Amino acid sequence: MGLIQTSRVKSPWILHFDNSSCNGCDIEILACLTPLYDVERFGMVNMGNPKHADILLITGPVNRRTARVLKNLYEQVPDPKVVVAVGTCASTAGVFHNCYNVLGGVDKVIPVDVYVPGCSVRPEAIIDGVVLALQKLATMR
Amino acid sequence: MIKQFIIVIVTLVVAPIIGGLLFGIDRKITARLQGRYGPPIIQPFYDFFKLLGKEHIAVSKLQFVWIYGYLVFMIVSLLFLFMKSDFLLLVFLLGFAGVSLVLGGFSTKSPYAHFGANRELLQILAYEPVLLLVAIGIYAQNGSFLISEIFKQDKPLLFSLWPLFLAVLYVLTIKMRKSPFDIATSHHGHQEIVKGVTTEYSGPYFALFHLAEWYEIVLLLGIIALFWANPLWVGILIALAAFILELLIDNIAARMTASWMVRLSWSVGLILGIANIAYIYYSKGVS
Amino acid sequence: MMAIAILLPVAAGFLILAVRNYYARAAVVVLTALILIANSVFFALQGPFTYTPGGFNWGLLITFLDFAILIFYIYIGFSLRNWLVLIFALTQLIPLAYFEFVMKAHIEVTPAFVIDHLALVMTLVISIIGSLICIYAIRYMYDHEHHLHLEKSKQSRFLFWLVLFLGAMNGLVFANNLVWLYFFWEVTTLCCYQLISHDKTEIAIKNAARALWMNATGGTAFICAIIYLYITQGGAAALSMQNIIGGTLQGSLILLPVALLCYTGCTKAAQMPFQTWLLGAMVAPTPVSALLHSSTMVKAGVYLVLRLAPAFAGTYLSTTIAMVGAFTFFATSALAISQTTGKRVLAYSTIANLGLIIACAGINTPLAIAAAILLIIFHAISKGLLFLCAGTIEHQIWSREIEDMEGLAEKAPLTTLITAIGILSMFLPPFGMLLGKWIALEAAYMVPLAAVFFVLASTLTIVFWTKWLGRLLQVLPKLRWPMEKLSSSYAVPLWTLLIGIFVVGVGIGPIYQNFLLAATNNVVSGNQIISLGLNNLVLTSSSILQTEILGVFPVWPLYLILLVALLLPLLLIGLKPTELRQVYMCGEQVGGTDTDEWLAEADKKTKFVLGGYYFQDTLGEKRVYPWANTVAILLLAIMIGCGVIVI
C-alpha cells in the first residue's frame, strides 16, 4: 500500500451525524471516544466538520427534514469517503419504519458502505464496523 | 553563502518533521494524562498524508492565497530565527502569517469561519504586544535587535528577562491553541465553533495548515530557547519543559472567553513586560 | 520655477473657475498636474537652493492677504453665529494688527525661501500625490453631483480650492520667513474650510467651522510665537526658520515659541484632543479627505514639528512631544476599531500615523528622524490610495459603511484588489509603512514609554485593518467575479499610487542613500541607515565607540517572497465548478452553493446575515473620549510647560 493509502487507514476522521435517532446509538458512539474504548489510538478523531471528515457515522432513520440536511453534509465531505450506518434505525429505519415522516434507512438518501445493526449498537460493534469501512477506504482510488 | 543555503534547506526539511513529532508527543502525553493510550507519535504525519490525498475542494479561490501566505511567512519567520537575523522583523513577519490566517477565515461568507477569524484577531491582539515587548526587552538588554547578538552574550537572557519569559508562556499557550486559550480554532476534539478559522479548509489546504503549525511550534520553542542561548541545549530543554507545561495546563484548564483572554494578557503580560523593560532602562541607562 | 510651484496652481485655479465646460476643465487640471509634477522632479534633480523674490513688495501683499483672510473668518463667525470661530479669528487679528501697525515690524528676512532636501521631499509628495488626487477629483465630483441631482454645478469652485491648495502647500514647505509661513498656513486652513463645507449641508458647515476654530487656535499660537521671537530676539533675524533651528539664537529663550509652534503643528495634524475636526471633515467629498486630510495638509503639521526638531533636541520638550505623538497613536488606533464607517477608520488611522511621525520627531535621533521622513512619504502614498479607494467604493455601492461593503470582492473585484493591497501596505512587511514603523520601534528605546505605546498601537492597527479587509472578501461560494469598469479618471490615480507603493518600496535602499539621507541630515546629522548590496537596509547604533548593527531588513527578498506567497497561488491555482462546495451551515442551506438563505425553525426561509465586530462598549468614542481627551490635554499642557520651564 502506498503512503497515502496507509495514511488513510491510519487516520480516519469521523463526522457523526444524528438523523433523528433516540440518541442511544449516539451515546454509544461517544462512548467509543472515551478512555475505556479509546478509538483515538487508531487515529480516529471526531471532527465536527464535514469538510475535514473521511467517515460518516450516521445514526437514526431519515425523515423529510433530515434528508436534505444529510444530502448537504454528504456533498460537503471530500472524497474518498465511506458511510457507516450505525444502528438498526440508520440501516432500515427499525421500529420507526411505519411513521409518516420517516423515509427509511440512510441508504434512501446517500450510498452506504457499512451497516452496523444493533439497538443500540455496542461500541465493539461500532469499532468493527469502522474497521470494515477502513478496509473499503484503503481500496479506494 | 553555502552555509546559509544549507541552513535554509535543513530548516525547510527538518523543522516540520520535528514539529510533527512534537505534536504527536503532545497527543500521546495528553492521552496518558487522560488515562488512555493515545495514537502513535507519528500520527500527525498520517493525518498530513491522508489530507494530501483528499479531493481538492474549496469555497473560494482566495482561500488558496491566504493559506499559502500563512505557510510561506511562517517559514520565512523560522528562517529569520535560524539565520539569526532581526528579531523585531521576525515578530512582524509572524504577524503577517497570523493576518493571512485570519483573512483565510474571512475569505468566504461562512458563519463559523467568520467567528473564528474575529476570535483569531482577538488572539493576535492578546499576544502580539508581548512579543513586541520581548523584542524591545532583547534590545534593552543587548543593545541590538539581532538574534546573533544574543548568542554572543555571557549571561543568558533568562536572568534579566525572566518576567518577559513568564509573559511569553502566555503567548505560547495562545499560539499552541491550548486551553484556556483555544478560542479561534483548536486541535482534535476541542470544538466550540466547529473548527473556527479552519472550518472551510479541507484536503490539501488543511494539510498546509498543519504543516504551517509544525513550523510554528519549532519557531515558538526556538524563541523560548533564545532565553538561554549559551549553551543552547539548556535553552532547548527549557523550551521542551515549557511545551510539557502547556500540555499540563491544557488538560487542567477549561476554555475561557475571548475577552477574558485579552484582558488577562494585556494586564498580566503588559505589566510583566513593562516592569521588566523599565527595570533594565533604569539600571542600565540608554546605550 | 518657484513661481510655477506656488503661483501656477493659483492661476490655474482661477482659470478653472472661469471654465464651464467639463472637458476643458479636466484638461486644465491635468495640464496643471503634469506641469507641477515635472516641476517638482526638476527641483529634486537640481538640488537645494535658496531664493528671495524681488521686484515686488511681496511682504506687503502677504500682510494684506493675511488680514483679508482673518476678516473673512470674522465674517464667517458672525454669519454662522459661531462664537469660537469669531473669538479665535480675533485672537489672531488683534496681535497681528499690533505686530504690523503698532510695532511697525519691518520684516525683511533673507532668504525668504529655503529649499533644502526636506523641503524637496515634501514638494515631491505634494506635487505628485496631490496632482493625482486632483485628477481623481475631476470624475469624482461629476459623479458626486449626478448622484445628488444638483442643478447648479459647483465643480469649478471645488477644483479651484483643491488646486489653489497645492500652491499654498508648496509655499508652506519652502518658506523660511515665519510670517510668510504663517500666511501659507492660513491659506491652507481657508482651503480646508471651503472644501469641507462644499456640500453646504448643515453638518458640513458645522464641521467646517469646527475645523476652522481648532486650526485657528493653532494660528493664534503661531502669531504669539512670532511676536515673542521678535521681541525677545530683537529683529527680523529671529523670524528666519533656519536661524531658529540653526542654533544662532539664544537657545534657552526660544523653547517657548518652539513649543507654541509645535502646538500649532499638533492642531493642524489633528492630534488628540483636536481629532474631532478631522473626523468631522470626513463628511466632505473624498478628494478632500484624500488630499487635505491624509496626504498633504495634515502633513504640514508634522512637517512643522519635524522642521523644528533641531531646535528642541535634547530637551524635556522633545520627550513630551514624543509622548503627545505616541499617546495619540495609541488612543486613535484603539478608536479606529470601533468605527463602522470606512472613512472614519481611515481618519483615525491617519491621526494615529501622524502621531507616530510626531513621536519620531520628538525622539530626535538620526534613526527616528529617518523613520519620520520615510513614514511621511509612505503614508502619503498608501493613505492617499486608500482614500481614493474609499471614494471609488462609495461611488459603486453608494454607501460609506463597512457593513455595506461586505462581499465587495464579487461586485467590484478590481477595486477590492487595489483596496486590499492598499490596506496590506499600511501595516505589513515588507511594505514601506511597516519599514518606517520598524525603524521607529528600533529607535524608540530613547523614550521607552513611547516605545510601549508604539507596541500597543501597532497591535491595535492589525485588528482594524484586518477586520475591514476581511469584510470586503466575504463572498458566498462563486466561481466567476466579473470585473467592473473604472473610469480612467479613477483608474489612473489608483494604479499610479499602487505602482508607487511597490516602486518606492522596493527601491527604498537607493532612494534613501541618494536622496532621503540628505533630508535626514537637514534635521539631525549622523547616518544610521546603511543600504547594503542586496538592498538590505542595515540600522546601526550611533555609539561613538563602535558601530553596532541594530537590525537588518532585507528589502527586495521580502517583496519577492510576498509575490510568491500571495500572487502565485492567485494566478496559478484554479477552481473547477465541480470543486466548489457550500459553506458549512449545519446542512441547512436552501439551494446551491451561492445561496444566502437557510431554513430556520419550521423550515422558514431566513436570510443569512453576518455582522462585523466593533467593540463599541469598550472602544467606542463615548467610552474612550473622556479619558483620552483628558490625558491628551494634560500632555499638551505639559508640552507647552516644558517650553516655559527652560531645561
Image (cartoon, coloured by chain):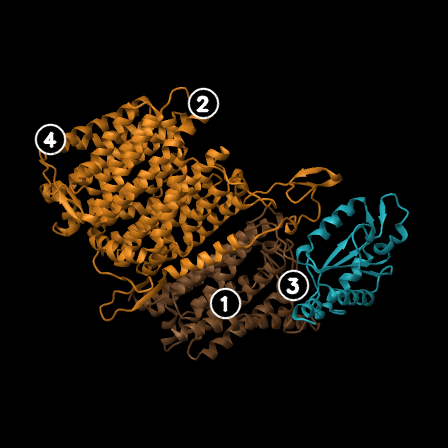
**Numbered disc 2: secondary structure:** loop
CB under 8 Å between discs 4 and 1: no
Mark 4 or mark 2: whose residue is earlier in sequence: 4
User: Mark 3 Cα within 10 Å, few/some/many (few <14, many 20+)?
Assistant: some
**Numbered disc 4: secondary structure:** helix
User: Mark 2 Cα within 10 Å, few/some/many (few <14, many 20+)?
Assistant: few
The verdict on a common chain for dots 3 and 2 is no
Residue holding disc 3: B53
Q: Nearer the viewer, residue C109 or C494?
A: C494
Mark 4 or 1: in front is: 1
Mark 4 or 3: in front is: 3
The verdict on a common chain for dots 1 and 3 is yes
CB under 8 Å between discs 4 and 3: no
Q: Chain of mark 2?
A: C
Residue C102's tag is 4
Q: Does residue C426 appear to the left or right of C542 in the view shown?
A: right
Please give the letter of the chain rendered in orange. C
Please give the letter of the chain rendered in cyan. A
The verdict on a common chain for dots 1 and 2 is no
